Image (cartoon, rainbow, N blue to C red):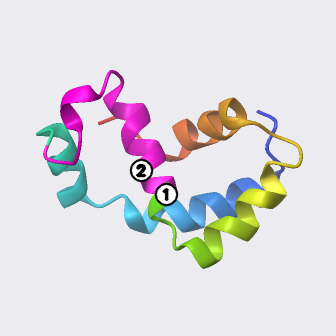
Amino acid sequence: MKIKPEHFEQLKTLIEPLDAATLRTRYQNKDFPRSDNVKNLDMRYRWDLFHMIPPCTRHPFSKTMYEYMNDDHIDTALRRIVPPL
């Protein structure tokens, strides 16, 4: 995994509070916008959690991560943080 340990811990700290049982149930029931177009539910859920991080926090953090990673690397980190639905 290419993410720096400090960025991984920060990402984990930001994502874990968002990963709530009620939200998981909604996604499992495909009760979210454009669910009919989703091919990979777990990936969609991971990235939706990522985008639920408030923009004022996410944008500076993302900018730093994208200096040395791409979406594939970030998705690998998200897979380690977010258990499958």
Q: Tag on residue 51?
A: 1
Classify the position of the C terminus by image quarter.
top left
Say left or right for 22 vs 80: left
Which residue is pictured at 29% across the width and 61% down the height? 20
Extreme bottom residue here?
56
Which residue is pictured at 81% across the width and 40% down the height? 69
Secondary structure under badge 1? helix
Q: CA distance from mark 1 to mark 2?
A: 5 Å
Amino acid type shown at disc 2:
Asp
Q: Quadrant of residue 22?
A: bottom left
Q: Are marks 1 and 2 in contact (CB under 8 Å)?
A: yes
Q: Is residue 82 magenta?
A: no
Q: Position of residue 24 (x, y in %)?
A: 24, 49
Q: Is residue 47 magenta?
A: yes
Amino acid type shown at disc 1:
His
Q: Nearer the viewer, residue 62 or 42?
A: 62
Secondary structure under badge 2? helix
According to the image, label 2 marks what residue?
48
Q: Quadrant of residue 73?
A: top right
Q: Position of residue 83 (x, y in %)?
A: 41, 40
Q: Position of residue 45 (x, y in %)?
A: 37, 43
Query: Which region is colored magenta?
Result: 31-50
Q: Position of residue 3 (x, y in %)?
A: 79, 44
Which residue is pictured at 15% across the width and 39% down the height? 30
